[in-house]
Image (cartoon, rainbow, N blue to C red):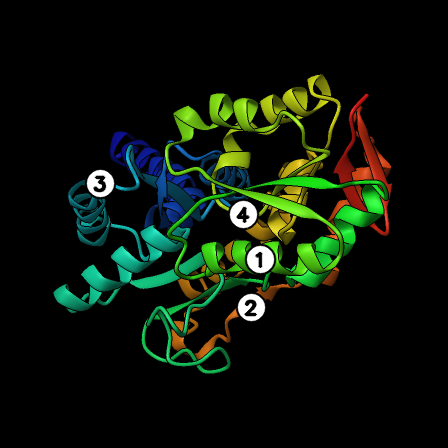
Amino acid sequence: MVLLVGVGVGVVLLGAAVFTAVKKRWPVWVFRKSIGVVYASEKLFHTMTVSALERLTATRPLLVCEKYSVSDIHDEKELREVCLKALHGSSKVLLSVGVRCSSMLVRCAKELKSGKAIVFMGVVHPVQLGLVTSLEQPGGLVTGVRTAEVEGVDQEVAMVKTVRADAKRVLLVFTPGGAPHGTEQRARQFQHVARANGLSATLLPISVPSRALPAIDAALRGHDVLLYLEGDILVNFAAELGALAARRKVVFCAGSIEGLAYASASISVYVDGLAEVVFDMAQQIALEGAKPGAIPVREVTCERFTLLNSTAQEQQKPEGFVVRDSKIVREAV
């Protein structure tokens, strides 16, 4: 009898210990949600965004970050395969970085009639691209963060005159074929406005990143200013472009809102701020049950960008950079 009582007490105590252990781990086992990220591993902006999202996810025990990377963003077949893999995966919410990843992911989701929620980022015109029906009421299963419009060419010409009043010749570098931004059209508009302001602008389209530096180096002779319009070239070669501009004794600046962040070496601050906004939206969907289509598309505004730039500037002013009219540009030493 005593033996039976002892065994019974032992079983009860063991059961209580097991229950306590399970209770502590129960929320993680049952409620943990996965957030997937579709991005291009070849792009600095993409990889830095993913790193920022991973850091944010690490602070949330109920969330885990799964990565779906494409090695060549221009390879439609590979991009499609990666997007399909993400849609068939276990992630409750999928984040997409940039125009190409976002467009392909949404397209594949429609083909599969997937029920996955999608949050995009790094897109200027989500409505025109067909990602959402409107900014205020996206509808469906897609929402995200819209990148603010780039500055007008009048402001860019004024910026060049500000950073170098005696400038005569400008080498304008841009990536052709940027339909969402109308990059080539803006480059020609800049050339026209620059001419009216006493500036001669040479247009240099760069479509192959590996050939960017030699091409810019060869074209830069005789110019006073190196102006980056927009695209992916500066993102991957910011330090090299700065060194090249310094060697040629020219001013190096950028003409787009994101480009200014890259040129000022404060991209990490910009990316962290953007990642926080996107992560907050993903949390609302994954943990709080919010409907993506009911979450308005947010925008990274010029004011927020300026604030982020100021924060980076207060922390550490990058060597070789000067601040003019609340903008950070690189100037030759």
**Mark number displayed over residue 230:** 4
In the image, taking residue 314 as reference, residue 292 lies left or right, namely: left
Label 4 element class:
loop
Label 3 element class:
loop
How many residues crowd mark 1 within 10 Å: few (<14), some (14–19), many (20+)?
Answer: some
Residue at image point 23% right, 67% down: 115
Q: Position of residue 256 (x, y in %)?
A: 62, 52
Between marks 1 and 4, how big is the CA–CA gap? 23 Å
Q: Nearer the viewer, mark 3 or mark 1?
A: 3
Label 2 element class:
strand
Q: Nearer the viewer, mark 4 or mark 2?
A: 4
**Mark number displayed over residue 75:** 3
Closer to the chain start, of discs 1 and 4, is: 4
Q: Nearer the viewer, residue 168 or 105?
A: 168
Between marks 2 and 3, how big is the CA–CA gap? 29 Å
Q: Amino acid at mark 3?
A: Asp
Closer to the chain start, of discs 4 and 3, is: 3
Q: Is residue 60 visible?
A: yes
Q: Amino acid at mark 1?
A: Val
Label 1 element class:
helix
Write down the residue under mark 1.
Answer: 277
